[in-house]
Image (tube, rainbow, N blue to C red):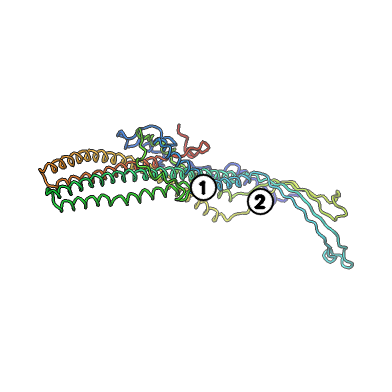
Amino acid sequence: MRTPAMKRLATLVLAALLAGCSGFIPPRAPLPEAAALNKPTAQGSFIGTSNGYVAQEPVPDAWWRLYDSRTLDGLVQQALAANTDLRTAAANLLKAQAALDLASAAQEPSTTLSAQPSFARRSAQEELHPGKPFPSKFVYGAGFGVSYQVDLFGQIQRSIDAAQADVGSATAARDAARVSVVAETTRAYLELCSAGREIVVAQNQVSLQARSTELTRRLAVHGRGTPVDVDRSSAQEEQVRASIPTLEAQRRVAMYRLAALTGRTPRELPEELGRCDQEPRLAKPIPIGDGAALLRRRPDIRRAEFDVLSASDRIGVVTGELYPKVALGASIGSVGVDQHALRSDSFKFSLGPLISWEFPDRTRVKARIRAAQADREALLARFDGVVLTALKETESALEVHARDQERRIILESARTQAQNAARDTQRLFEAGRIGYLPVLDALRTLSQIEQSVAAAESRVAADQVNLFLALGGGWDDEATPRSPPLRPMQP
């Protein structure tokens, strides 16, 4: 017979269950309207587009193929297949996927199977039959059970959602690693070839200065020059030659970087790779797209956004600790002595729901909820920071690239003038109209400008890689969502 107290308890439990069904666990919070990602100024065209070096065209995923270099394409493919950082990122993604499988398993029924054979004798005193002991017998027990937790409050689903967001974050981290590996491989190859080109320029300058030194020596022999002029020319020749070992070291270091990026030891890299003396050039302006495309494309932005999603879902997971857990279960078994195994009187079964509610310390749980909410706020701030950093890096790369292009053009004009000056002073010296010192100054100026032009061209090549890196290209995976569900998909 039910007592009033039992009725009140049942009413409270039912009320709690109904309240849970109506949704005490908060839904996933949307991205704040004030987020940097939502600002119209972040979605439009870039500031640094008013020049002929870039074009507002979509950035291709395989941007390195714009250089039209089979060698570079082969190096990038080797790096994508064997780079150690990419292998680490792939393993982290597998780990996140395994965690998702584990969270999803909570939605499946769980089963148990037991078998307990034993040889035992019951105590007569224990059975309240003192006197002659009970005989020893073989006793068995066997059973099978199945249970299923009903996710009335959505805690399991929120755990799955958080795990899915973690998979998205790990996928974005892998894509970010691909972007970095592609950019660093391209950078190392361009630096290798740029160093080779600068070595050729330096060698040509040494040859030019050596011819001038030889001419000065012949003139000194015939009384039209002095030993001082010969020494000056020789010193300038050696000064130019002294730059070559540094450039050789830069070329070798770039080769070693390529070896590490492609998963090889330094000795495994082909030696002919070091003979490159002209870096590949882009045949058309760099495609850069706009801000909206950048914010969809950059993997670090997607990773930060998935981290916010995961933090939002974990608020729901912690909130679920305030409510009871309901499981449906059934079991069947047989217990008895071996002589009567599996007789009808040895069977037992149970069927019914199990409601467990560990009344929580609400202060403790609410403190954990506040901590989870604080984690989300911190990740939202980080998300805004990543968005702003992406825009800053892109605009900065555009500005530096444009100014270095201008500098290169100015230096090329200066080189033409220096070549004319060196040629004219050499003719005047050979005609005996001037001394050797003006020739020496003209050659020194030409050598310095030639080296400056070579360095400027190398700098522009590096600027291009920095720009592509800031744009976030270099990955292509159709299975990867390009926009997390925290924000609407862009057309």
Badge number at residue 159: none
**Residue 54 in sight here:** yes
Query: Could you tell me if residue 305 is visible in this image?
Result: no
Q: Which residue is mark 2?
A: 356
Q: Position of residue 215 (x, y in %)?
A: 18, 46
The residue indicated by pointer 1 is 87
- Confirm or deny contact between disc 2 and disc 1 (CB under 8 A): no
The residue drawn where x is 25% and y is 49% is 240
Image coords of residue 314 (percent x, y):
53, 48
Distance between mark 2 and mark 1 Cα atoms: 44 Å
Taking the spot 31% from the left edge, 44% from the top edge, the residue there is 200
The single residue placed furthest to the left in the displayed view is: 433
- Amino acid carrying label 1: it is Arg
Residue at the spot 45% in from the left edge and 31% down from the top edge = 491
**Amino acid type at image mark 2:** Ser
Give x and y (percent) for residue 61.
44, 36
